[in-house]
Image (cartoon, coloured by chain):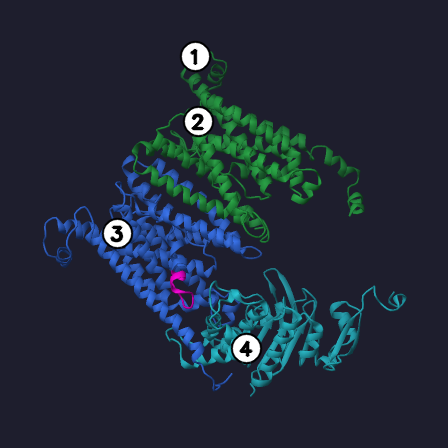
Amino acid sequence: MSNTHVFRVDNLVSGYENKTIIHGIDLEIPRNKISVIIGANGCGKSTLLKTMAKLIKPTEGDVTLNGKAINKYPPKQLARILGLLPQSPVVPEGITVADLVGRGRFPHQSLFSGWSKKDYEAVEEAMEFMNIKEFADLDIDELSGGQRQRVWIAMALAQQTDILFLDEPTTFLDITYQVEILDLLTNLNRKFGTTIVMVLHDINLSARYADHIFAVKSGKLVAEGKPTDVLTADLVKTVFDLNCVVIPDPISDTPLIIPKGRYHVKDESATL
Amino acid sequence: MRKQTGEVNFIMEGMRQRRRRWLFVTSILVIIAIGLCCAMLLLGNTIYPVNVVMRSLMGEEITGANFAINTIRLPRMITGVFAGFAFGVAGYIFQTMLRNPLANPNILGITSGSSVAAVFCIVVLHTSNTVVSIAAILGGLVTVIVMYFLSRGRSFSIGRLIIIGIGMQAMLDAVISYLILKSAQQDIAAALRWLSGSLNGSKMTEAIPLVMLVIIFTPILLVLGKQLSMLELGEQMATSLGVATDKMRVTLIISSVILIAIATATTGPIAFVSFLAGPIANRLVGVSASNILPAGLVGAILVLFADLIGQFAFEYRFPVGVITGILGAPYLIYLIIRMNRKGEL
Amino acid sequence: MIRLKNSSSNSKKKQLDIHAPKHFSLILVIGLILLLVTVFASLVLGARVVSFQELMDGLFYQNQDSYGANVVQKRISRTVFSLCCGVALGIAGVLMQSVTRNPLADPSILGVNTGASLFVIIGITFFHINTAGQYIWLALIGAAITAVFVFGIGSMGRGGATPIKLVLAGAATSAALSSLVTAIMIPSTYAMDQFRFWQVGSVGSGSWDSIAIFIPFLVTGVIIALVSAPALNALALGDDVATGLGVRPGMLRFFAICAGVVLCGVTTALAGPIGFIGLLATHAMRLVIGPDLRFLIPMSALAGAIILTFSDVVGRLIGSPGELEVGIITAFIGAPILILLAKRSKVRSL
């Protein structure tokens, strides 16, 4: 299964009230692929994602879905195509897992309609997919960080969008859960062809799980493409200002970045 | 995510069960509210039997009963029900939207804003009821707008909003105190109502605008309940689920301020009802669906119940606001303790 | 760490540590001049503006039968009383803020005033108490209980007594107590009459008698505050550092809070609840002379006296021919300051 949505960003300038963060970015999201936006802290990768998800209004330029600016879509219609999982969503007090996942069905319901069979099925499937059915009737507060993150993704899945944005979905999670979440997202992409765009902090996991990398520095796109093509020692130096060695990942053959600091280098005089 | 042959029953069952609980508890709340309404009509200095009350309400001439029931108890009951409902609904909406039970119109100073406008009209301008109502609504809206501009900063924070609200309230309450101190002796009784809400002397003519506005705005708010539930997930999540957050927020705030203001203009600030109704409703009904209706019902029940206590439990008649204040304050403190323990503040 | 500290504190900074803040003497002189002006205004202005001759007559007890001289003498006691209240509230404010390391801690915001009110109204209603001497003890007990209660609630949970937690605990307690106050007051017309005017803070009732009652408490409070100032400076760096510097935080807190509660409790008993003075005085002064408590405490006292007396004069002028109670004025000036503080402070610290 695949989707045919064309999502483009043209000449985008964006930021907060009096601070421009994104200084002119053009890009097209690869269809049915997993894309990862990487960059140093404060480079604007989150701002870029938020602007693409209509959370921030662009100062200049366009964000278009199938040739139409995203803010021209009726909100619910857009929400049926494009979903976003923010970095720190808010948990309403005392809500159960199933009910929270169910809230993802909002864009599919009209003002007056109740719950249809389809809604229940979507919730069921999303929970099945994220392996959280056993928690259905638990309070969110009773879950661990990793389980909670699965619930949020399940909610985004229940929304049944063809494009899904995730803002640092693995932050604050143990490495085990990070891999688990990324595996589940890959599953989602392979099974339904969902176009996934996410911001990730871990450059090596990005290299492994991404089909396509967008490297951002100071609000500009400095490189994009397949991880094997893009992730070089030079790029890491440019984007993160970090000296490193790039070797093939023994597991996936994708680039593996080995950082080089000032100390603990076999031949310390060589780095100076 | 297309159809998969699985048993959807398990999850549907849980969700349906919660929905049934919602319906069940809400119906019980309706029944309790009706029961209290009847009590309001039956009880008083003279306790009339049901059939007399019925006949009197139907318009039959019964000396004594007519006056007590149609002129005193009926307006009191209607005012209590609708004001309580309005306080409950508006409080619930603020609490849910700002995701903090403490963020209710009482603490944010909105009630005080309405009160100032109303007291000013009554004590200084001696205007008619309609003008008082309109002034109260404007007072509430102005307070909200001022609060909005004051709390806008580099980043929004509930804590800041609440502290600003407490500050606004201190100022507005100082104005009320001033107006009351300066008011002529004969106005003091009327003005004192603005220190703690009361149903004493409710008149049908004063209740009409309240009833009308509640009837107009409740359906609007009920329809928006689903959107409100989405807002509860945070600005970003709500936007990505297709809620036009800015528009929705403005609509919800204006509607609930109108409700709270008209209720305040009619009864005075009945303490804590707008604060208590939401959390109690959530506790009783669960938080699966939007609890606007249950919160309104709880509000009405609280007001009627407190008024009955105020009228009959002691040898002296207390205004309803004093009773709700005494009942509500410990709950507020309990809530703060609980939030502190959980580290939510 | 040690090296860094030494290198940053060059000789100039060391001097600052020992000596008064920059421009301290200038600020002190300006403060004293302002105080004099306010006192003069308080004696002269009001519903009836007295002439210079009348002022002199009144001050030096000449020409006793002149109406103007009488007015002035009334105003003398009133002015002295309001100065006392201002000093007490200013110091109470600094103490509470520094003990809790919380910029919003003020007796009125923490509900301590309402606690005092509740006990006073209980005294009036049930025990028919009506002298200032009796009010004081009730108000003190009420203030102390409320302070302990509010701090108890506010410091539960993670992070201790953060500003938002304390303010909320105070507001909630205040709301609870004022419901009780109303409930007790309503059935009794006697209490209502007594209380209606007490409830809005006013220094109009200040007489030499009440000043005489006030002075011992005031002096005790001021001494405790001044003596504990250096230790409180250490406490500002956190409990751990303070302990390292030889301060016992628990003891210090206890004494400082006691002093704060006594000062504002007594003021409340005699003048009624007057809000926001502590907040205003302390923050204004901190802005000008910085956070060193050895200087901040006396300067806040001075500022408190000026602000309260000034507010009282304003109240008399606006409310003429009657008067507008000073509690209303201070709430009106003080609340915007609270709002400003909330606006300026970072979200984290709330």
**Is C273 left, or right, of A12 in this rendering?**
left
Q: Which residue does the image show at 54% across and 57% down from the upper left?
A: B156
Q: CA distance from mark 1 to mark 2?
A: 20 Å
Disc 3 chain ID: B
Q: Which residue is denoted by mark 4 in the rendering? A: A131
Q: CA distance from mark 4 to mark 3?
A: 58 Å
Residue A65: % across, % down: 55, 79
Task: Tell me what hue chain B is rendered in.
Answer: blue
The amino acid pointed to by label 2 is Gly
Residue B206 numbered tag:
3
Disc 4 chain ID: A
Instruction: Report if the CB atoms under discs 2 and 4 are less than 8 Å apart.
Output: no
User: Mark 1 or mark 2: which comes first in sequence?
Assistant: 2
Q: Name the secondary structure under disc 1.
A: loop
**Is A151 left, or right, of B318 in this rendering?**
right
Q: CA distance from mark 3 to mark 2?
A: 42 Å
Which of pointers 1 and 3 indicates the residue nearer the eye? Answer: 3
Q: Which residue does the image show at 47% across and 14% down from the upper left?
A: C57
Q: Are marks 3 and 2 on the same chain?
A: no
**Is A136 left, or right, of C181 in this rendering?**
right
Residue B286 located within the stretch drawn in magenta: yes
Q: Which residue is denoted by mark 2 in the rendering? A: C46
